[in-house]
Image (cartoon, rainbow, N blue to C red):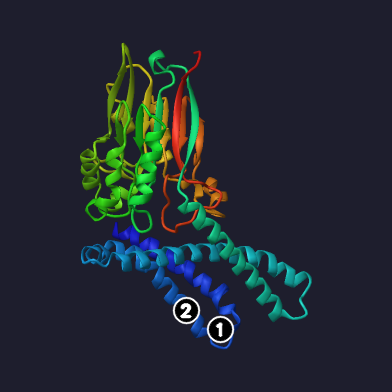
Amino acid sequence: MARQVSIIVGILALLNAFGAWRVMARIPWAGDHPALAWLTALGFFALQMAGPFGDHLWFPAMRRAGLGLIVRVVDWISHLAFGAMSLMVVFAIVLDAVTIPWRLIAPPADPLAFDRAALMTMGAAIIVTMVIGIWQARRGPVVHVTEVPLANLPPAFDGFRIAQISDLHVGPTIGRGYVRSVVDMVNGTTPDMIALTGDFADSNPDDVEQEIAPLAGLKATHGAYFVTGNHEYFWDAAAWMAAFRRMGAKVLTNEHIILRRGTDAMVVAGVTDYSTRRMGPPHGSNPAGALAGAPDTMKILLAHQPASHVAAEKAGADLQLSGHTHSGQYFPFNLMIGWFQRYYKGLNRHGALWIYVNQGTGYWGPPLRTGVPAEVTLLILRRTPS
């Protein structure tokens, strides 16, 4: 964990250094005072770190001391600063890709004015992207309905309705009101089963007890089933499993259960997060172990990361429900996510396996979503001819 944190902080420090070099040092007021640009960048970096480190270290105590409003303000500013930095770095690279050849081909008569106009254009683009992103993130999820054709679906399960919530990320900027609206939305779909596919919070369960409490109100004929994501392991996975059990969900830890309708049966299995696959039992992610001994019928696997698909297909799963990718979450990262994830949104086919990837019911980090709406998924299983 400490090694992962060090790597992430190091990468963010390098990105901020790039921003200072390519953007802040070029702002007119910093021209004669380059040290001031670097000091500004250092303060901007410290602001980005204040929220994540505070959430791990001192914010829980501040909330208990009645200083929750201060914590919330700092968290919002910190996470927005992180979003602005990420956009600044990408937009600066694009700006250089355009303006450097432009300068070589047609040198401007006034280079300073040219540079200033380019920076102002980039600044306006960042502001517009962030305003749209905040609005789309805070308006909450939409219900995305998808029918899944399955040749071996038992007849009694034709039309079976699965509501999926993934990557809710309760914590710094997502609270009780957002969670309650998600619960109402899910219950409004009248699901037969609810799949909870990990990354539900960015905190310990005791610190967000009131915020997650509405999840106990989820209702489905065959119940709710939870699997861990990587963020549960950033905090306390065992405590999160216990919290979901208290809220009435069945926690699937490399195991399966059998749902029955009359004489027909269907298997629902769940694995711990893909990042745990090198751990020993009981936490090491193991699709084959989760489906071991399952009857020869339709098999659904809940797995937080789509990357579990290779082992899932080998284990004989017919449908995998995942999240994790957020489909890039906000522009321009929604255009890049395909470079890093083979399956990153919607319904996909991998050999004999169907994979559905939820775009995220909440959001992680910056409260931004552009072009990638948050979703509650309603999957309707349909029996098709063999």
Q: Is residue 343 above or below residue 158?
A: below
- Image quarter for residue 105? bottom right
Type of amino acid at the residue the image marks with label 2 = Thr
Give the position of the N terminus as an image quadrant: bottom left
- Furthest-top residue in view? 263
Residue at numbered disc 2:
40
User: Total number of numbered labels?
Assistant: 2
Which label is found at residue 288? Answer: none
User: Height in image: 304 above or below 132?
Assistant: above
Label 1 packing within 10 angstroms: few (<14), some (14-19), many (20+)? some
Residue 361, percent across and down?
42, 45
Residue at x 28%, y 61% (from the top left corner):
56
For the point 35% across and 29% down, the residue is 193
Q: Are marks 1 and 2 in contact (CB under 8 Å)?
A: yes
Tell me if 325 is positioned left or right of 170 in this view.
Answer: right
**Can I make out residue 313 in this image?**
no
The foreground one among 35 and 329 is 329
Q: CA distance from mark 1 to mark 2?
A: 10 Å
Q: Nearer the viewer, residue 166 or 298?
A: 166
Of the two numbered discs 1 and 2 on the same chain, state the one appearing first in sequence.
1
Point out residue 276 in the picture as x, y percentages from the top left corner: 31, 44
Q: Amino acid at mark 1?
A: Ala
Work out whether residue 82 can be spotted: yes
The residue at 21%/47% (across/down) is 239
Q: Which residue is mark 1?
A: 30
Q: Position of residue 362 (x, y in %)?
A: 41, 48
Q: Name the secondary structure under disc 1.
A: helix
